Amino acid sequence: MRRTRYPLVLLLLLAAGVASAQCQRSPTTSELSIKGFGAAYFQQVRTDSANDRIEFYGGVCLTGEGVGWTVLAESVTIRGLRGELAVSAQHPTLHLEGWTLTAADLQADRRELTLSTVQVDGKDLGGTAATVTVDLQQGSMQLDQAALRAPTFWVRGSRATVTADGITVDHPRITSCTCGGSPLYDVQGSTARLDLQGKSVVLQDGRLHAGPVTLPLSASLTLSEKTLKDLSVPVKVSYVPSDAAAGVAGTGLGVTVGPVGLGPGVHADVGATGLDAAYPLSGVALIAGKAGGDAFTFGKAPGGLRFEMTSDHALLPWLDAGFDTRVLEAGNRDALREGVLHLRAHTPLPALRGDAALKLLAAGSSQTPSTGAVAGARVGATGSLRASTGPAPWGRMTLRTALHGSLYPDQQASQWGVEVQPGYGVRLGPVQVDLGYLARFTDSGSPFTTSLDRLEPAQRPSLNVSARGAWAPGWSASGTLAASYDLVSAPSVDAGLNRLHAGASVARQLGAWRVSAGLDTALEGVIGPNGERDGYLQGHVTAADGGLELGARARYTWAPDPLGLDRLELSAAVPIELPGVELKPYLALNFAPTVTDGTLPAISGHGLDLTFVTCCGALQLGYRDQDGTWSVSVSVDLQRRSAAAVQAGGPGCAGATAAGSTLTVAGAGGATCDAGPAAGPTGASAPGTASGSTTASGTGIMAGAAAGTPPP
Amino acid sequence: MRCPSRLAGVRALLGVLLIVLVVGGQALAETAPFAALTVTPAGPQRYDITTGVTTLPQGGTVVDQDTGVTLKAASLQYVEGATIDAKDASVTGSFGRLTATSIHIDVPAATLRASGDLQLVRDGLTVQADALRYDAGREVVDFTGPVRGASPDFQADRVLLDARSGDVLLLGQYRFSEGALTLTSPTGGGRLELHLHQAGGKPVYDAATEISPALLARFSAELR
């Protein structure tokens, strides 16, 4: 067992410059095995039986039984051979499971090993600790007063516990600012869990500190490459214009901050809408909480007052009970107030690969639709059954059925409904085909609207086909076809073609350029039952080299308004580098009016991206208005750093060690750092990959992905 | 009379021989060990007047009057003032008790060589080896062949013993065990000093790979 790690240990020895000590017998190296503890490889030894001690010197390698640990030192002393074994060494280097720890002092017994004044390196982390205690049986490490550097963040904590699963840091302070000095910001919490393989950090009870500002974060915050890409940021920017045709009362420009943690399971969103002059100013203040099956939300929403409280609990393994209260106001339009008590019995049906459920409810509801207010009690029952054949080479069949029945005593009304929804799906190579059918029979007897519980009859077959894969070497392609057809009319839908969309796109990397092209069409407005649905054909071509973006788009519209060629657009986003910031203005011009009417081209889109490259990472802020649809974007690239961060011996430099080697840090324009002997422990750290971005349209988005913490 | 014998006819001859050995030994006693030997046959002895070899087919005892070294053997041959060869013999002296199937003593050189089922036992040390050479003048024992120690537990290609101090030097490929410890030489061989001292009234050996100058001086002839 021990022999299997000799080659690795030899490499480590060479890297550490300890050529005199070899962890195996050699023509000049002796071995001393200590039963139940390990073995020592050394140049010289002397025993002192009167004092029950052995001293190894002239270059010593000490290896342990159990977990694979190795200590290199100029000399090692072992005492207590006849009793409690005690090992001591000055200026040792410990290698353990991919970690390299150099220290001023080492003390060990058969159970644990303690290092003092330690420099830590390995597994993409480097740093220091006041003491490190290693459990020689389990291989776990405990670092006290730890200050660790990862490629993309620094973390300090009162204690860091390293196991095979990851690293847990108590009272952590994390920052992505790796240029030394006081960090621009840090995140503190009760604990942080570092998963070095998954490159993620899970922070509990986090608080963001930036100068004098402290901002509570969610109770459990996960930071990883993925979560940073899907960043959930505490600030939202939105722009909701009025749309009279759709009956939407706009709220204009809005900014809200949240969710901001107020305590365990409780958070708040605060802000305002109507910040632009065209809309009335209105405040937003919502507090929400959740604990087990109980949840609540109350406060002032953009549309009006909002109060929701739900409580769902399992009474028995097969029986749940709940009580919901909702007050939703939206500018006196479609307001809803109700309280609902419900019971739900359910059971799995393994033989059918499905389940069955029966739900009973009693509610008092008040709704204010445009047709007039309606209020009263409602009592209902719903029985449902789901079954499936399970996956098979020939595909998978599913069936969903439901029976609805409701009484409205105050209106002396009732409603029934029967719903049958069979489906079939099959994958044919890269093609997925799904067929479905919805059959709903009902008397539509509810006095409330479809947004609450009114059912409408439906007979609707549907087809969805999608394909994705490599079309040819170097090319990727995808295509979709979606169609549905209403066989019967209902108050909100006419019989006929409901949807017919088709699209295809291809993409290829050509040198530094990523080129893509696509074509899609919607035909339900052309061959459907009326002209209120979409009917268009559009195509686009884009090319981007990571900075410069070029695009062209054309659209021909038939329905709902026969506009003909309404889009012939050319767009470009050009990056401009300035000291400390990068600008990327975006402009799209629509030449369709020029072609059709001979007028000047119209601006169909504009935007601006600002990228600030700091030692904390690169922060990108941007907005884009495309055809009146606003979007705001924020991205955080922790991989990209200013030169100052690299020169400060950031994570990338942490790997270079005692050998004084020079290495190149990926990203950041290939900056280099020269790690001299004082640069600390070694171990070429793999460049970090934590980066991410987030964008949102319509309701916007925003900032502040808290990655990290602090302190040098 | 040191030479009891049932054969009265040979008593006179033995008496003469004893006188010769004692006298001859006294002449050499001031210069080397094995110079004052007393031979006591356990049975008949034959003297070959052509070669000068005396054979004791039933063995006997040889005692060095000066050092107290005592040789007992199942059979003996000696040449007066020159050599003694013994079979299935044991030798007791300051260096301990040596048993071997074959022992050869070079009287003028004051050396003893032994081989075959060889074992040396002394206080705190038991050694088995293929062969040994004992320099009686310098009191140094040189064990060769695979050498094994039972107390302490060791193995070595070669072992030197300082019969005065009890210190031991392991040479070549060696292994030394004590309790839970097992010390093994470099693959290219090496030296390990085992320094004898008393701890709690018991002999104890301390090991060191750096050999003390005093021990190196003691073994300078063997290490040449």
Image (cartoon, coloured by chain):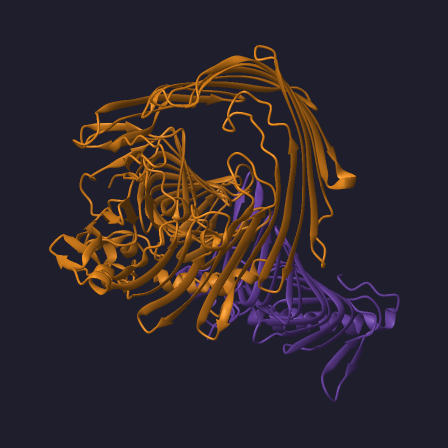
Q: Within the image, what quadrant is residue A662 found in?
A: bottom left
Residue A137: x percent and y percent?
A: 55, 42
Residue shown at the point (34%, 67%) measured from the top left: A514
Relative placement, left or right, of A465 versus A249 is right
Residue A710, compared with residue A508, is above or below; it is: above
- Near-viewer residue (A570 or A686): A570
Residue shown at the point (42%, 59%) measured from the top left: B212
Q: Within the image, what quadrant is residue A327 found in?
A: top left
Task: Count the labels in the image.
Answer: 0
Residue A665, compared with residue A76, is above or below; it is: below
Residue shown at the point (35%, 43%) measured from the top left: A105
What's the colour of chain B in the image? purple
Q: Quadrant of the C terminus of chain A?
A: top left
Extreme residue in the bottom direction: B50
Taking the image as drawn, is residue A30 in sight?
no
Taking the image as drawn, is residue B87 in sight?
yes
Q: Within the image, what quadrant is residue A657 found in?
A: bottom left
Relative placement, left or right, of B101 versus A360 is right
- Near-viewer residue (B34 or A464): A464
What's the colour of chain A in the image? orange
Residue A251: x percent and y percent?
A: 27, 30
- Near-viewer residue (B204 or A58): A58
Residue B13: x percent and y percent?
A: 78, 74
Residue A291: x percent and y percent?
A: 49, 21
- Near-viewer residue (A523 or A314): A523
Extreme residue in the left direction: A579
Residue B68, compared with residue A245, is above or below; it is: below
Relative placement, left or right, of A388 versus A692 is right
